[in-house]
């Protein structure tokens, strides 16, 4: 099995075997982060540029650490949306960066499809670090790795994804990722946040959190973006947390060894109670650790080894 | 100079003709239609139309010529040149120029530029409201006297239902039809494509079919209330078709158009974030496409108009969400409509009716017919000519065409306006 892509734009483009290859490689890279000297020379002389048009701490840092552990040089560019509006186009920014000969460009952008737009125009590899409402493929890969480590398998699991599915690129990438690997995905949220045609992605759909978590092996809570209240997607935070917040009582409905995940950052007391977030079933911090390993693997496949 | 168009198959829905006839043109008017060989050729310029179809000049009742204000996208000269190359002898241009065509001075400028260009006839459409801002009625009487054939706030649809009621009543005063771009802006919100399986997959915000349908229903109800002539622009959904069919069965004075992209493409054309497939209303589903074709066939949709909407690379070579809505169609509209004929969805008379006789009738233009005495606006069509769409060779200044590279069958080969051959295919 080989990884033959120039870019990583979405989970939808990957075969299950390719996903397994990334996960296996990520698992083997994890050990590097436990060494006293957390660095290998694999990507020495390579340049990784991160281009973030949306605020992010975790994902940008995770890519930077991943690149540095493989000895790549990194350069981070954060562009505020307002200056982008006044200034040059996305294509011009990217062409200017490419003129400095990076090996891979990691991009986060509010416009769905922005990484695809760049990938069509640039010779260097492009990694989608989150595009609009579309995909966030490395998040889904790190979630798969976390679940596979905890459960030793992915097929046949019941995975519940709960919250604002409509506005979540994490939800889309995870629906693709888990269904491709043989899990059964159920999504739940208020109907205002469940876009039509979700079942065409292979997910079961319900408006009941209770139904979604029943017998679940994995419960993934999504971050509620607080500005959705002003946009008529929900009434009050109080009511949202009452009907769609994960509390200890819900865990009794799930499998005994259920694991709880969240892509972060948490709204404690809104979509997840502190007892659950900090409790024994939570793998939220393990997700962050695995994020570095998965991004090391992705960088390795796109620019590593003899391909460079 | 008189002109004898000889040996063609004349298709004229206004006279229910689909017969081999020769056509005589004198002093810019049609003088006679006679069985082949009856009209003497001596002293006349003879145009051989053997193996060609001769139709009333095609009319596109919904185009954007961008002048005044956005001449980098299109000018009246380039847009009307695109029209004649696509077989159109007349176009009705929408008022969303800069400034908006909400007064007689802008209307006269458009007509002067069209005359100077000397290609197709141009019929300006005036704005429903001043500046198309949806607040105050513009001067319909003045506009009509200056040459406007209808009013619309196309592109900036009338949200206020009271304004729409008053616009219909005021337009009735001057016997002008109101052309409605039906879109509930609150429901469409910041959607960029049809709300469906593909928008979900691409993570793009959707515009539901309901955003169009609720306004079609509103405007039909208001047409019934006011007795005014209402024309629904660019119908894209099966639901709109069903409501319009019902309204026509009730005898309401309503007409409607669709565009070739709504019977040719679906939401799937957007896959890959193709900005040339970003258009408003958006490309819908297979079910909608089927319904639109059926509605042209049964007359629920009267006209095919391409909603020619030129944009430059500045508006289209950007992220999908940032790209402008719209595509150009004047140079492909006839061929895409003839595809329905080749596929058996329409007969030739229905196609020419939708592209000429019906829109001319709706806007009260003198064309759309080959009756003796009518202006000699004539299109010659080679039904079987295969050609490959090359947007880089278009007369239009813009290139935002989702059909680039397609091979199509059937094409205009000569366009005659007022008895003058304004364009003919080379070779």
Image (cartoon, coloured by chain):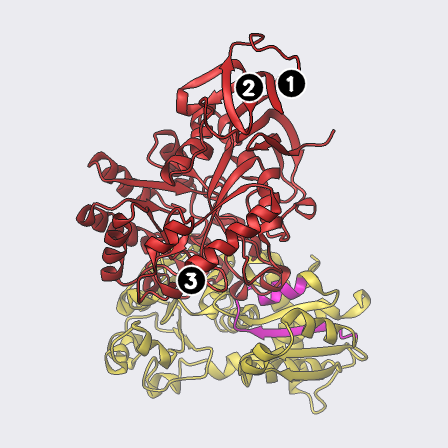
**Residue A211, image x and y in percent?**
28, 65
Cα–Cα span, label 3 and label 1 = 57 Å
**For the residues bearing labels 2 and 3, Cβ distance under 8 angstroms:** no
**Residue B129, image x and y in percent?**
34, 62
In the picture of the structure, the residue carrying the numbered disc 2 is: B24
> Residue at (44%, 70%) from the top-left corner?
A168
Quarter of the image with the N terminus of chain A in it: bottom right
**For the residues bearing labels 1 and 2, Cβ distance under 8 angstroms:** yes
> Residue at (58%, 45%) from the top-left corner?
B80
**Residue A50, image x and y in percent?**
65, 79
Q: Is residue A261 magenta?
A: no
Q: Residue furthest top?
A: B38
Q: Is residue A45 above or below residue B378?
A: below
> Residue at (63%, 16%) from the top-left corner?
B50
Pinpoint the chain carrying mark 2: B
In the picture of the structure, the residue carrying the numbered disc 3 is: B191
Kind of element beneath mark 2:
strand
| Relative to B37, B258 lies left or right | left
Kind of element beneath mark 3:
loop
Q: Are marks 2 and 3 on the same chain?
A: yes
In the picture of the structure, the residue carrying the numbered disc 1 is: B44
Pinpoint the chain carrying mark 1: B
Cα–Cα span, label 2 and label 3 = 52 Å
Residue stretch in magenta: A101-119
Q: Earlier in the sequence, mark 3 or mark 1?
A: 1
Q: Earlier in the sequence, mark 2 or mark 3?
A: 2
> Residue at (39%, 33%) from the top-left corner?
B358
Mark drawn on residue A228: none
* Image hue for chain A: yellow
| Relative to B326, B353 lies left or right | left
């Amino acid at each position: 099995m080989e990884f033959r892509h120039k870019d990583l734009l979405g989970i939808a483009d990957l075969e299950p075997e390719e996903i397994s290859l990334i996960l296996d490689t990520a698992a083997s890279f994890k050990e590097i982060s436990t060494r006293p000297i957390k660095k290998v020379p694999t990507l020495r002389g390579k340049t990784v540029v991160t281009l973030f048009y949306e605020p992010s701490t975790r994902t940008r840092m995770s890519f930077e650490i991943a690149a540095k552990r493989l000895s790549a040089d990194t350069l981070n560019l954060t562009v505020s949306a307002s200056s982008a509006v006044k200034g040059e186009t996305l294509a011009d920014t990217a062409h200017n960066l490419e003129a400095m000969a990076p090996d891979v460009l990691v991009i986060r952008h509010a416009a769905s499809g922005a990484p695809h737009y760049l990938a069509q125009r640039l010779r260097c590899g492009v990694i989608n670090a989150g595009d609009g409402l579309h995909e966030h493929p490395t998040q889904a890969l790190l979630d798969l790795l976390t679940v596979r480590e905890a459960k030793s398998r992915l097929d046949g699991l019941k995975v519940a994804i709960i919250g604002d599915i409509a506005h979540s690129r994490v939800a889309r990438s995870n629906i693709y990722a888990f269904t491709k690997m043989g899990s059964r995905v159920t999504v739940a949220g208020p109907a205002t946040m469940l876009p039509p045609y979700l079942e065409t992605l292979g997910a079961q759909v319900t408006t009941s959190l209770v139904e979604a978590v029943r017998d679940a092996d994995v419960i993934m809570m999504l971050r509620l973006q607080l500005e959705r209240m002003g946009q008529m997607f929900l009434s009050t935070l109080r009511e949202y947390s009452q009907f769609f917040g994960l509390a200890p009582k819900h865990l009794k409905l799930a499998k005994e060894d259920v694991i709880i995940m969240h892509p972060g950052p948490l709204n404690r007391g809104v979509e997840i109670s502190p007892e659950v977030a900090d409790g024994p079933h939570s793998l939220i911090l393990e997700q962050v650790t695995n994020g570095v390993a998965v991004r090391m693997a992705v960088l390795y496949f796109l620019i590593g080894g003899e391909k460079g | 100079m008189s002109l004898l168009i000889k040996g063609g198959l004349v298709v004229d829905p206004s006279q229910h003709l689909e017969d081999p006839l020769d056509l005589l043109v004198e002093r810019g008017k049609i003088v006679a239609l006679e069985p082949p060989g009856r009209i003497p050729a001596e002293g006349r310029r003879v145009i051989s139309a053997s193996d060609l179809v001769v139709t009333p000049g095609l009319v596109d009742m919904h185009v954007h010529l961008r002048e005044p204000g956005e001449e980098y996208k299109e000018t009246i000269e380039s847009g009307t040149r695109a029209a004649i190359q696509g077989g159109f002898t007349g176009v009705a241009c929408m008022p969303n120029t800069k400034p908006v065509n909400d007064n007689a001075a802008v209307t006269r400028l458009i007509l002067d530029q069209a005359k100077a260009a000397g290609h197709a006839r141009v019929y300006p459409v005036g704005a429903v409201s001043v500046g198309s801002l949806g607040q105050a009625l513009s001067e319909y009487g003045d506009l009509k006297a200056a040459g406007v054939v209808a009013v619309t706030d196309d592109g900036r649809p009338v949200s206020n239902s009271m304004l729409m009621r008053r616009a219909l009543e005021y337009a009735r005063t001057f016997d002008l039809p109101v052309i409605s771009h039906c879109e509930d802006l609150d429901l469409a919100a910041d959607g960029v494509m049809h709300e469906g399986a593909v928008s979900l997959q691409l993570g793009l915000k959707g515009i539901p079919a309901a955003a169009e349908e609720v306004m079609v229903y509103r405007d039909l109800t208001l047409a019934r209330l006011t007795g005014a002539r209402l024309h629904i622009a660019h119908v894209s959904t099966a639901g709109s078709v069903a409501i319009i069919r019902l309204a026509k069965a009730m005898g309401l004075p309503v007409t409607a158009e669709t565009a070739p992209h709504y019977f040719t493409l679906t939401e799937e054309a957007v896959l890959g974030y193709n900005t040339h497939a970003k258009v408003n209303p958006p490309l819908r589903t297979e079910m909608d496409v089927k319904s639109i074709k059926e509605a042209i066939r049964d007359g629920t949709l009267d006209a095919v108009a391409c909603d020619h909407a030129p944009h430059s690379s500045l508006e289209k070579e950007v992220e999908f969400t940032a790209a402008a809505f719209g595509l150009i169609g004047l140079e492909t509209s006839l061929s895409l409509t003839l595809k329905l004929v080749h596929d058996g969805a329409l007969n030739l008379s229905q196609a020419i009716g939708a592209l000429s006789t019906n829109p001319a009738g709706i806007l009260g233009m003198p064309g759309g017919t080959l009756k003796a005495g009518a202006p000699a606006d004539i299109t010659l069509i080679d039904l079987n000519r295969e050609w490959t769409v090359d947007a880089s060779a278009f007369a239009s200044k813009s290139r935002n065409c989702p059909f680039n590279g397609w091979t199509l069958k059937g094409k205009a080969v000569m366009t005659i306006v007022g008895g003058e051959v304004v364009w003919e295919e080379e070779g």
